[in-house]
Amino acid sequence: MQYIAYYRVSTVRQGQSGLGLEAQQSAVSGYLNSKSGELLAEYTEVQSGKKDENRPELQAALRQCRLTGATLLIAKLDRLSRNRSFLMSVQDSSVKFVAVDMPEANHFTVGLMACLADYERELARERTKAALQAAKARGVKLGNPRLAEVRHSDTTAASEASIAKAKERNAEILEIINEMVGEMPSAQRECLSLRTLASLLNDAGYKTSRGKEWHPTSVSRVLAA
């Protein structure tokens, strides 16, 4: 199993001194040893848990998880976020994650933490259903008069969503390639081949959209997108 570790400290002082950070690293290390896991990369954020916006290190960690199929690993659940909606957005991003202090609260079970909100949404649906039934009883015509047109466009909408998702993934891979190339000496950049780029992506653990290794042809598609 491959993991991407994410650490968060609340203040710059904590980040510089290692206060809190060392404990998180120790917890992650112990978990990896117990699971014989492979650590691909580590990301450290200096940000208050109450602020879910502007989290570049977390977004970078999630991006690498999406593109490699690795699991996001955090020492404590509150290091990810104290905000329920943000936790759910991470879950919905298709990235698996595990919190060392609460391993049962992984990608598949974190939704239980939002059960009260889900229950409230169910109550809202029931209230809406009751209101619609009451309106129907008063003779109000319900439904979409353009239903046939909407149904006809369903397949098109799904296809467009799939294309948009592919473009988004290609854009992320292109960012990775640019970051890799940008770190190279200029002389080395000038003679890069598609095969070399494919090897760099494979060595870093990145996968194609189908979970396969990169080849010159698949890299060329990304560069041409």
Image: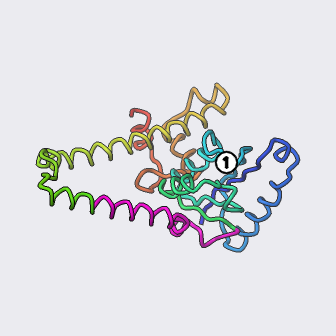
Residue 108, magenta (yes or no):
yes
| Mark 1 secondary-structure assignment | loop
Q: Quadrant of the N terminus?
A: bottom right
Q: Position of residue 165 (x, y in %)?
A: 38, 45
Q: Look at the picture and state if 174 lies above or below 140.
A: above
Q: Is 62 located above or below residue 96 in the figure? A: above
* Most common SS among magenta residues: helix
Residue nearer the viewer, 207 or 129 = 129
Q: Residue at x 44, y 44 (%)?
A: 169
The image shows residue 43 at horizontal and vertical percentages of 69, 49
Q: Looking at this view, name the residue that lies furthest to the right.
A: 17
Query: Residue at image x 81%, y 41%?
Result: 12
- Quarter of the figure with the C terminus: top left
- All told, the count of numbered labels is 1
Q: Residue furthest front?
A: 138
Query: Dot 1, how many residues are within 10 Å of its Cα: few (below 14), some (14-19), or many (20+)?
Result: few
Give whichever of 133, 6 is nearer the camera.
Answer: 133
Q: Please name the residue shown 61% across and 49% down the image.
A: 61
Task: Report which quarter residue 181 is drawn in.
Answer: top right
> Which is nearer the eye, 179 or 124?
124
Give x and y (percent) for residue 81: 64, 54
Q: Does residue 8 show up magenta in the picture?
A: no
Magenta part of the chain:
101-129
Residue 177 in the figure: left or right of residue 19: left
Which residue is at a point 70% across and 52% down the rendered structure image?
Answer: 42
152 relative to 161 in the view: left or right? left
Q: Which residue is mark 1?
A: 50
**How far from the left and from the top, in percent, is residue 222?**
43, 38
